Amino acid sequence: MSMAIMSILTFICLLPLVIHQPAAITTALLFGARMFANGTYTVASIYAPEVYPTSLRATGSGIACAVGRIGGMICPIVAVGLVSGCHQTAAIVLLEIVTVVSVVSIQLFPFETKGQELTDTVTSTTTLVSNRK
């Protein structure tokens, strides 16, 4: 839930930047967006090991961390390239799309794992359902 809230706050901070803002407001909104995006990444790095089965925990966490770091490297390159090419609106819209995709992806995570039986191995959903009967 924290990841979704912080991603939505990132979206809200970026939304006014689609139109031209004074420098102070732009700086404040970008700082807020970056703060919430970093918070989302921090919560994700804590939460990711909890949703993977024990046998895949290190691999899953490593892939999640790597994808986050790759995105962190690519984002400034794309954003600076678009902004320096006088396409600030396109850069903000691209970041907004990535944020919306992130919020949708976050909704696929289990909401609460406390008290739930988590498996130590990877099994298909049909196997889990048939074992409960």
Image (cartoon, grey):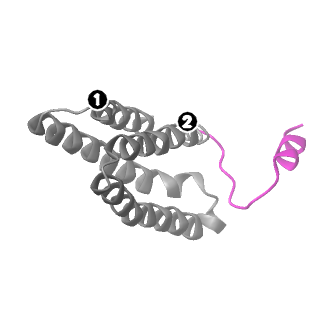
* Residue for point 38% across, 47% down: 91
- The residue lying furthest to the front in this view is 86
Q: Earlier in the sequence, mark 2 or mark 1?
A: 1
Tell me the tag on residue 41: none
Q: Nearer the viewer, residue 78 or 4?
A: 78
Q: Nearer the viewer, residue 53 or 3?
A: 3
User: Where does label 2 land, which residue?
Assistant: 111
Residue 132 highlighted magenta (yes or no) = yes
* Residue for point 32% across, 45% down: 88
Q: Is residue 38 left or right of residue 65?
A: left
Q: Nearer the viewer, residue 4 or 118?
A: 4
Q: Which residues, given as a range, are shown in magenta? A: 115-133
Q: Nearer the viewer, mark 2 or mark 1?
A: 1
Q: Position of residue 111 (x, y in %)?
A: 55, 35
- As displayed, is residue 78 above or below residue 40? below
Q: Is residue 13 left or right of residue 24?
A: right
Badge 1 amino acid: Pro
Residue 73: name its quadrant.
bottom left
Q: Position of residue 77 (x, y in %)?
A: 35, 63
For mark 2, does the 10 Å Cα neighbourhood hold few (<14), some (14 to 19), or many (20 or more) residues?
A: few
Label 1 near label 2: C-beta < 8 Å?
no
For mark 1, does the 10 Å Cα neighbourhood hold few (<14), some (14 to 19), or many (20 or more) residues?
A: some
Residue 58: name its quadrant.
bottom right
The residues tagged by marks 2 and 1 sit, at their Cα atoms, a distance apart of 30 Å
Badge 2 amino acid: Phe
User: Where does label 1 land, which residue?
Assistant: 16
Residue 27 highlighted magenta (yes or no) = no
